[in-house]
Image: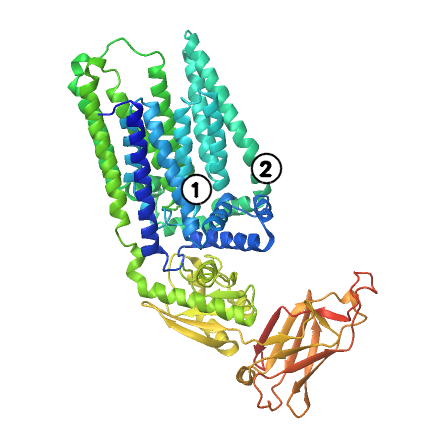
Amino acid sequence: MFSENKSFDRSILLLVLAVIVVEALLFFSFYTREIAWYPPLKWDQSVYLTETYRLQEKIFANGLSELWHAMWSAGHPSGLLLAIEGALSGLLLGGTRWPQLFVNFIAFVALQAIAFKTGQAVWSRRAYGYAALGLILCQATLWLPIGGLFDFRMDFLAYCLYGVWTCAVIRSNLFLDRRWAIACGLISAFLVLNRFLTISYVLGVCAGFIAVSTAISIFQPGKTALARRMWTRLCNTGLSLGILTIIVVPILVLNWTAIHDYYVIGHALGDEKYVRAREAGITDLAGYLLYYPKTILFYHWGPTFLWGSAIVMIGGLAARLLCRRNLLESEQVPGRDETFFLQIIFLIGAILGPVVALTIDIAKSSTVGGVVGVPTALLVVALAARIRAGLRETNSRHTGKLVAISSLAVFALGLFHYFDQASRHVPDHAHQHDLERLAELDGWLVNYAVEQGWSRPKISFDLISDQLNTTIITASGYEQLHKFVEFSPMLGNGIMGVEKSEALSLLENSDFIILTDAQKEGPYPFYNRVARYWGDLKAWSDKNMFVARTVRFDKFTVIVYARPTAKISGIMGGWVSIDGFAVEPSRTALHQFPVIRLRGPANYSWLPKIPTVSAAIETGKGALAVPASLQRTDDGYEIRIDTSAIELPPIDPVRVQLTFDTFFIPKEIGINDDTRKLVIPAPTFVQLIGSKS
């Protein structure tokens, strides 16, 4: 059934390529139908997409050198390469989100090809390649809404790359082959640079393997050939880990502060870990210890994979039972038992290593456990191959048919599972109308910010949501409008929450405030705090902001407040000159909020004195003086213009001209060759407020 001639090999290659082409077509069809039309939900995905789009825009502006700068930039807490890979894919394929998700697909194609070849080469039958490939296709991880193929985050890439590394170790005959050991080191480095946490998996598994190999060498003293092989394995394992260390340690050191804050403070020392545990429904020790075994079994493997594993094992058992009277009793291939034993030990370690590392962390996430999927599939294949091992060659044709039939059945089951899942709606499809309204709101926020000249608008929320947050607005706006406006979070930026005074201070410095009538309840301490002073947030917003729009979703209503502001003209290269500048608020806004407040940085050592500001409104019949003042602040200045006591002219917008009584010339004080008469840097914050604020 599985001929070994070259013509048949070409046919198999064409079959595998055809399968990949069909997978690609289904991938694009599924993306177009189920993904492209709604915003990139879920916090992690929107964060990584925002990083990717930011890097793309830098490349468009400054060239490919930005990729090198990104490689050696600090501040990456969990991984480095994902945004770089996404940006490169975006440059090659064009568009947004589709090229980023294509990175996942390429990784999955590589995993399938390598798993197929590993099954064929290691266990000496092409059928086992089909079994390994089929078992991977049967797993539920691929289609998870969080951490699956269509979710741009590190989890799916880690699943694929950790699987590729596991295959490479098995192909190396457990580090016996030096060239494959070098490849293992390079693959593991690529894995770790994509997700830093996986270094604990690789080091833990390799440490366990080294311990077992050392024990075998010690407790088998009379077997010189075995000792030589084990010594070679130990040396090559060290070589592989050395390559990993040389590549990743400089990056980890560069990002150590961010890694420490994220994992040590956030996951080990801070209180957030307990909140995350409660969010996952963990209330006792049993739940803590069994969380990952349960999520892996039911969430990542799923029933299709369990059925596929049973078929593979039953195929091997049937083959052995068919020829049970013809088993070889003593003719064993030298090293076979040792190789099988090490395979099983390594694969069990590759499964248990991540589970143990994740279980130690009190914070829990159902997404991360899927990384053990490929080692599990290889373990099933290894056990099935071992069950059949040792049968006489005279019976290999009959037993080979059984193995081939079971492997092809699993492969067919995997393909059916892929096609079946690709034909279904995503869970978010049930909320299509809400998501369409959300996309429209995201686009409006970006357009409004652009119209007001806000390059980094600040926004506050009264809830923690995977639909309403800064990175989703930024990424969604970029995908819809191709305008990269990065929103900065204020209130609602952490699940722990803040006290009332700080919350009101955050509102005061916000450009947008989003308040909802949703119940303020949930596992996060944020809700407990917000519920106590939500009325104060609403009262402050009503008094100091204006309602820009209201959006009704199925379960709650969103009120969007915007900061009353005004346009500025007359700025010279980011500086206010002695000629001053103009502020142009709308007449309606100035009626409701008659005081104009401007803030910006300043270096008073360059000026002869603190400037005095004068303001006048152009009425068409002459200039009307308006009370104005400039106050020095800790890091700059604040200008206030009070129009509350004057009658506004019937001109819209109202033009307020500001002038100053002092200046400096950069060339004369030795700063540079600029000969302009400058006063202060341009305002970075413009707000209209009530006269009593």
CB under 8 Å between callouts 1 and 2? no
Q: Which of pointers 1 and 2 lies earlier in the amino acid sequence?
A: 2
Q: Residue at x 42, y 42 (%)?
A: 157
Amino acid on which disc 2 is placed? Pro
Q: Is residue 292 above or below residue 42?
A: above
Label 2: few (<14), some or many (≥20) within 10 Å? few
Amino acid on which disc 1 is placed? Asp
Percent x, y of residue 687: 58, 74
Please count the marks in the image: 2
- According to the picture, the residue beneath numbered tag 1 turns out to be 361
Label 1: few (<14), some or many (≥20) within 10 Å? some
Quadrant of residue 473 in the image? bottom left
**Left or right of 497 in this view: 690:** right
- According to the picture, the residue beneath numbered tag 2 turns out to be 250
Q: Quadrant where the N terminus lies?
A: top left
Taking the view exactly as shown, the residue that stands out farthest to the top is: 222
Q: Is residue 175 above or below residue 587?
A: above
Percent x, y of residue 317: 20, 24
Marks 1 and 2, how far apart at CA = 25 Å
Taking the view exactly as shown, the residue that stands out farthest to the bottom is: 621
Tell me the mark number nearer the camera, choosing from 1 and 2.
2
**Left or right of 541 in this view: 366:** left
Percent x, y of residue 389: 26, 18
Q: Residue at x 42, y 9 (%)?
A: 225
Q: Quadrant where the C terminus lies?
A: bottom right
Seen from the viewer's position, the closer of residues 593 and 100 is 100
Q: Residue at x 50, y 20 (%)?
A: 235
